[in-house]
Amino acid sequence: MSRALVLLALGVAAHELHGSPKDGESAALEARRTTETCKAFTYASDFGLAGDGKVDDYPALQAAIDSAASNDDCGGTVILPKGNFLTKTSLTIPGGVTVRGQGYGSSPLAISFDSGGSVIGYCGTQYAVVITGHSASLENVAVYDWRYPVGEYCDSVKAAGGVLIDADAHGVESTSMDNVLIYWFMGGTALTLRAQNGGIIAFSRFVDVKIRHAQSGILLSADEDSVCNSNAFVGFTVWGGIDEYGLKAEGPGPCNMNTFYACEIEPSATELAHVYVTGSKTNVRLLDVRLEGTAMSELDKPLVIIDDSSYGNVMTGSIGHTNIKYDANRNPGVDLISAKTVPTDPAPLNVLWNAAFNSYDAEARSLAGWKTPGTNWNIEVLPDDEALYADHQVLRIDKLSYGGAFKFEPDQLPRSPAHSFVTFGIYARSSVPSSISAAMRYESGSIISSSSHSGSGDWE
């Protein structure tokens, strides 16, 4: 007899000795309790899943999760089979439980319902999945704001969000998500970390999580008495149709030192900003990130807004199409760069002579190293307390109502004997939309320019 047959025979014999299944359990689950497999995992299929996207699978899924949390005979990892699991109530994952599926199919851009994927399809007005305890995990699944049948109830109702890490008057530490697609939450926030009423969210890890099509991408939030900090996001992607923001971090409680490594936030446009940080106890660390917004240039909106109350933000990587709105003195670690932007800190190899705007001669109306053609302007050197950096001056330029555009040009630039790469830009403040931009003219006559100032009245 083969080993497989011996194990099967032992399982049957043990089942016969063990007695009848407990109330509400399938015979398969009762039989599995006597095997080594059950000691390792809890199989959701043993709890009567349909997996057809039509029958409400919430009772069966939640029963499997609760069983895994109860320290019963089977393990704390719930294995989802392939299938489309319709849920009409929020799934709650308590501490110590891992829900692990079979992936989310062959497409990184949508739910393709193939390749044996596991899809949690939520039809309701709350969050699809709520994680409430330490060391809980969600892995290898898609979480979808369910839309089927098209034209019926689930197609019209909009969820508050996809996944909620909920620390309400308690701590939630060391949770994790891995290889999860959060899809089509157009009425809410795809992923929320919310600490309130003295709650704490910390030391959690989110790896290879993709958000596509949502009203908002990621919200990190801590109320006055709560903390949301020291959480890490690796390989995170927010793209597709994102209406309000890609990432928002807010206080008033400590919501800081949350770090994003090698992540991308690249919807074509957002209403608020791709990244928005606010609160005196709030900051984020974006390391080697990519920020893109192809339609933001037409809207004259910054991709990143760091409210004046926030400080200590660190951002490195690339930013495309528009600019950053922030206080550089309070956030010296912001150094995003791309082919059309320049970091706001003084460049160590600045080829513009007198980029610090020193030695303005008011009587001669001249500034060393710069051309100031025409007469339709007045320049004033602001007091030292307005300076952004040591040994740098801030110039106030009043453009008069005649004579066309005011152009501020360097006297000369070094020539490169071969093709080379440069960045250029200005750091400016204006209350007039589209009043300031940086431009570079090639010897051929073609021009490349930055986005214009939004007119916010702040430094951009």
Image (spheres, helix red, strand yellow):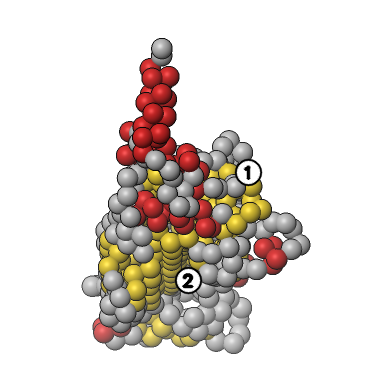
Q: Is residue 5 above or below residue 51?
A: above
Q: Quadrant of residue 318?
A: bottom left
Identified by mark 1, the residue type is Ser
Going 34% across and 76% down the picture, which residue do you hit? 196
What quarter of the picture does the C terminus occupy? bottom left
How many numbered badges does the structure rendering display? 2
Residue 249 seen anywhere in this rendered image of the structure: yes
Residue 420 seen anywhere in this rendered image of the structure: no
Q: Quadrant of residue 159?
A: bottom right
Identify the secondary structure beneath mark 1: loop
Q: Are marks 2 and 1 in contact (CB under 8 Å)?
A: no
Most foreground residue, 55 or 408: 55
Q: Give the percent coordinates (x, y) of residue 262.
A: 39, 49
Q: Is residue 19 above or below residue 265?
A: above
Going 67% across and 63% down the picture, which residue do you hit? 154
Going 41% across and 14% down the picture, which residue do you hit? 2
Q: Is residue 69 above or below residue 193?
A: above
Precedes in sequence: disc 2 or disc 1: 1
What quarter of the picture does the N terminus occupy? top left
Identify the disc placed on residue 124.
none
Question: What residue is disc 2 on?
Answer: 408
Cα gap from disc 2 to disc 1, whole angstroms: 54 Å
Question: What residue is disc 1 on?
Answer: 112
Identified by mark 2, the residue type is Phe
* Disc number lying in front (2 or 1): 1
Q: Give the percent coordinates (x, y) of residue 164.
A: 43, 65
